[in-house]
Image (tube, coloured by chain):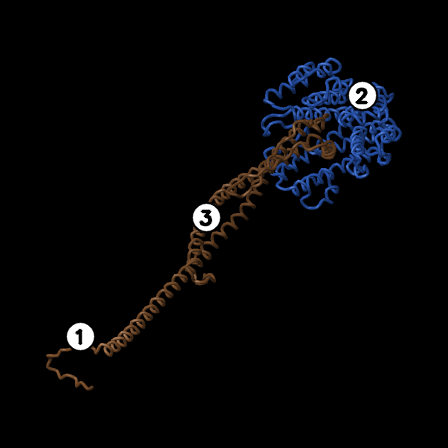
Chain colours: A brown, B blue
Amino acid sequence: MSSGAGREAVFPTRQSLGLMKSKLKGAETGHSLLKRKSEALTKRFREITRRIDEAKRKMGRVMQIAAFSLAEVTYAVGGSNITYQIQESVKSARFRLRTKQENVSGVFLPQFESFSTNDAKDDFGLTGLGKGGQQVQRCRETYRRAVETLVELASLQTAFVTLDEVIKVVNRRVNAIEHVIIPRTENTIKYINSELDEMDREEFYRLKKVSNKKQRDQAATDKELQRQRKKTDGGADDEPPDVLGTQEDDDVIF
Amino acid sequence: MEGMFYNVNGGFVEGIVRGYRNTLLTAQNYSNLTQCETIDDVKLQLGPAYGDTLAALPPNPSTSSLASKTTEKLVADFRYLQAQATGSLAKFMEYLTYGYMIDNVALLITGTLHERDTRELLERCHPLGWFETLPVLCVATNIEELYNSVLIETPLAPYFKGSLSHQDLDELNIEIVRNTLYKNYLEDFYHFVNNHPDMRGTPTAEVMSGVLEFEADRRAINITINSFGTELSKSERQKLYPQFGKLYPEGSLMLSRADDIESVGLAVSGVGDYKSFFDQMNQSGGVGAGNMAGGSANEGKSLEDLFYQKEMELSKLVFTHQFTHAVIYAWVKLREQEIRNITWIAECIAQNQKDRIGNYITVF
């Protein structure tokens, strides 16, 4: 496939071929799994993006209303030091956060949940008793909603960032497996196969050579043997001479 | 006859105040203001009325700095009048500042209770409620010292004495302290305008009684409505009602027993004005009694708006009387409302909420 894939530094043996084959199989399974994970994450990611968009728009509206209700308070109270009074009269936070984790295909996404402590009584319920108390309370409610929206948005944003990171990592792995590990393993397998084939051919040739040599040797020894046997048995061993033949007999010399 | 010698002492100041009254913004000015696109335009429109005070503002000033500058103008004018005033008029003007002093002292008490550096709070104090010995209160580090300094150093001592001890400052909610002081202040002011030899039987007594009674009733009604759903008990609430006014005593008694808006409406039904307020509020389907309840400007005015409107009308009527100190009171109230109107309009422009911009109150 890719030219840069190269191959792994292994000895082309049958054992490493087996090893490589199982590695390839593992890589393919991993690849499909990671691919699916990445798709699941991306789906989630898109959903979160959409929700962030909604939340941001909502935040814009809510914050505008909240800022305006503060203006109403200033109008009703007459611009005195209501802010300071409220800051000072608050003793404990009524609006709190709880964090939990959500597991999306192995990724832990932090989630923020807001809740208010009901046991603590209203710290500045009496602020603006003379005038403007109602506005102060209404403003508080508006800002409460604004903070709720902010918390929701924060939760989404954190998830967004975390998911983004994870998706990048997963995609990198998928690409690495797809474009590097699998080709390289395939190359290695090819290499091992070719080496093994080469070795097979060499072996075959060598064997052929050896058997040829053996045949030749055999033939040589046979001849030798025949000759010796002829010597000993007078040559009548394997073929009776055609005594009636027309050819001239060898002169027998004694 | 009672006006025969008024001008000997008070004529000059009254003349000036009537001049100031003519520079108040009119409905025409306000409709010009609402057409503005930016705060700079607002500044430009305010030019004739406020002149140099706004010149120092940077381009596109924040609404709060606009408000503080306009307040500065009010304070400067007030201080000028105060410097001209003599005799009972000077005393009368001091009484006007006591209301702001109460706010300032309450602020310092809050600071001391939470062990803050009260010196920083001096900047936040309302300049009209500033008195020379105010910084002395910052020396106090605990509430008992503060209580003693207040008794010694401030003109508010009579309001503290008798109804609040230094333990009370520690234990009671600061709002209750403030409202107790304010109640004592209103009663004292009422007593002052009706019993001072210079003012008894004069238009001042007559007019001021009217506006102070209205103020007292307004406070009583507001306190009642705002205390719903809080830990303020009914008997404590009753202690905060000023002991005069059109509602006192029957209406106040009924207010102290009220549990919801309807019973408040019932309690005030003896007085025609307040009854019509509640009727208007119910007609417009007012959900809350607060200022600008509901969403848009067309939904009709809320109770607090109606009160402000009434206050402004009363203040306007004060100017029909001659030879009276009350014009100064009325002028201060009108200017305060003007500042709030300006702030509101500026706020609406800055936040691009033009649909509610018409919520200001104008009587001229």
Amino acid carrying label 1: it is Glu
SS for tag 3?
Answer: helix
Q: Do the residues labelled 2 and 1 touch (CB within 8 Å)?
A: no
- Percent coordinates x, y for residue A15 in the rendering: 43, 58
Q: Is residue B225 above or below residue B60?
A: above
> What is the CA distance from the residue labelled 2 to the residue labelled 1?
162 Å
> Which chain does the residue under circle 3 lie in?
A
SS for tag 2?
Answer: helix
The foreground one among B252 and A165 is: A165
How many dots with numbers? 3
Amino acid carrying label 3: it is Lys
Q: Residue at x 68, y 36 (%)?
A: B343
Q: Are marks 2 and 1 on the same chain?
A: no
- Percent coordinates x, y for residue B48 in the rendering: 71, 40
Q: Which mark is residue A35?
A: 3
Q: Residue at x 46, y 57 (%)?
A: A180
Residue beneath disc 1: A239
Residue beneath disc 2: B187
